[in-house]
Image (cartoon, rainbow, N blue to C red):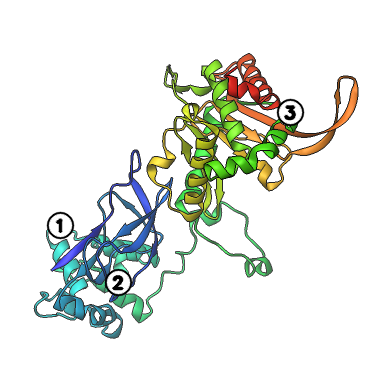
Amino acid sequence: MATEIRVPTLGESVSEATVGTWFKKVGDAIKADEPILELETDKVTIEVPAPASGTLSEIVVAAGETVGLGALLGQIAEGAAAAAAPAAAAAPAAAPAAPAAAQPAAVAPAQPAVAAAAASSSSASVSTMPPAPAASKMLAENNLSADQVDGSGKRGQVLKGDVIAAVAKGISAPAAAPAATPAAARGPSTVEDASREERVKMTRLRQTIAKRLKDAQNTAAMLTTYNEVDMKAVMDLRNKYKDIFEKKHGVKLGFMGFFTKAVTHALKELPAVNAEIDGTDVIYKNYCHVGMAVGTDKGLVVPVIRDADQMSIAEIEKELGRLAKAARDGSLSMADMQGGTFTITNGGVYGSLMSSPILNAPQSGILGMHKIQERPVAIGGQVVIRPMMYLALSYDHRMVDGKEAVTFLVRVKESLEDPERLVLDL
């Protein structure tokens, strides 16, 4: 008896994913609840656990393919069928006599995967008999057409085993096939350059980042306002109490706690920056879920600190530490990524002195932090050296007026230059 491996529920508003890495290959033993593959959604990477113990008898969807909710990914065999699985995996390549796959499973036990494909496709037989779904995917992967493969299914239907056998025989795509539409969109490379180029398919996360950022530019009336903040007061406060803070709370005192509290104070005073547009309606959020943009080796993710306005600086630092570690480890959950009302991005950790952040739609505001740099400034008629940071607020001008945007940034500046205001809620 075989157990199916299917795409699990991926979370709110997520309807499809891309198969990332299979941790097991056909014939490998599997324990129940052991991670066997990962799925990349447009928000997070999810590990799929084995629904049962046994042997991986079939991989239906290869890495890089897109699947929907509930789609069949593979099968796990148990008992005697599990022991026969390794031989079954090698059979298509070793025995090119594909027509044998049309035999019932009891007659051809060495090819259970092919027989299962034939059985599952028989109920969908029609007069034209298009290729079976699994076969169609393999045809596309190998740039083959159905008429290049001899079908062994009912009425000549092309099955997955037929495609495997055809590829093993060396059947290749027609000469015209390589002329794909995406390649025509870019200018041709010289022969010398082409040999030094590498074409890699974008991950689903990177595709989503690209789409969402471009959509934000196309949809919102985006504008950026700038200011600078003297970080001396925060730095002095941090240096004075960082050891005591870490000893009591078990977490380091950074700058993000101060910035997050300053942002939540400003959002309460200027609710338009915390709102979003929905058609012809404006949705005002009476809570502050602050997203923190985090760079990972797979791309930019924005985990969310929920109800940050109700947290202390210590609680914010603890939650930020948890989310940052989960982002780097690839273990963020869907809940960690949803519901943000405002975003903070810190390009200063990479050395950025000034930038204009792009909105994280459908939010109406995003605050960009930058590198702290000592500069000469005039204070009380005297030129002094102070640790200064440029701030940038990008906002949706459809929702936020210039006066509100500038006032918001000034309030953040005031809170950071006089951090006692954060304690006194001023």
Q: Residue at 67% of width from left, 20% of height from top?
A: 410
177 horizontally vs 102: left or right: right
Q: CA distance from mark 1 to mark 3?
A: 66 Å
Query: Circles 3 and 2: CB distance less than 8 Å?
Result: no
Q: Residue at 42% of width from left, 17% of height from top?
A: 280
Q: Residue 304 at x, y = what percent?
A: 47, 37
Q: N-terminal of the two: label 1 or label 2?
A: 1
Q: CA distance from mark 1 to mark 2?
A: 19 Å
74 horizontally vs 255: left or right: left
Does residue 270 appear anywhere in the picture? no
Amino acid at circle 1: Ala
Query: Circles 1 and 2: CB distance less than 8 Å?
Result: no
Which residue is nearer to you in this view: 388 or 152?
388
Displayed quadrant of residue 102: bottom left
227 shown above or below 28? above
Amino acid at circle 2: Val
Q: N-terminal of the two: label 3 or label 2?
A: 2
For label 3, the residue is: 228
Amino acid at circle 3: Glu
For label 1, the residue is: 124
Displayed quadrant of residue 234: top right
Q: Residue 151 at x, y = what percent?
A: 22, 71
Q: Secondary structure at mark 3?
A: strand
Q: Residue 133 at x, y = what percent?
A: 25, 60
Does residue 57 appear anywhere in the picture? yes
For label 2, the residue is: 163
226 horizontally vs 146: left or right: right
238 shown above or below 200? above
Q: Secondary structure at mark 2?
A: helix
Q: Secondary structure at mark 1?
A: loop
Mark 3 packing: few (<14 Cα in 10 Å), some, or many (20+)?
Answer: some
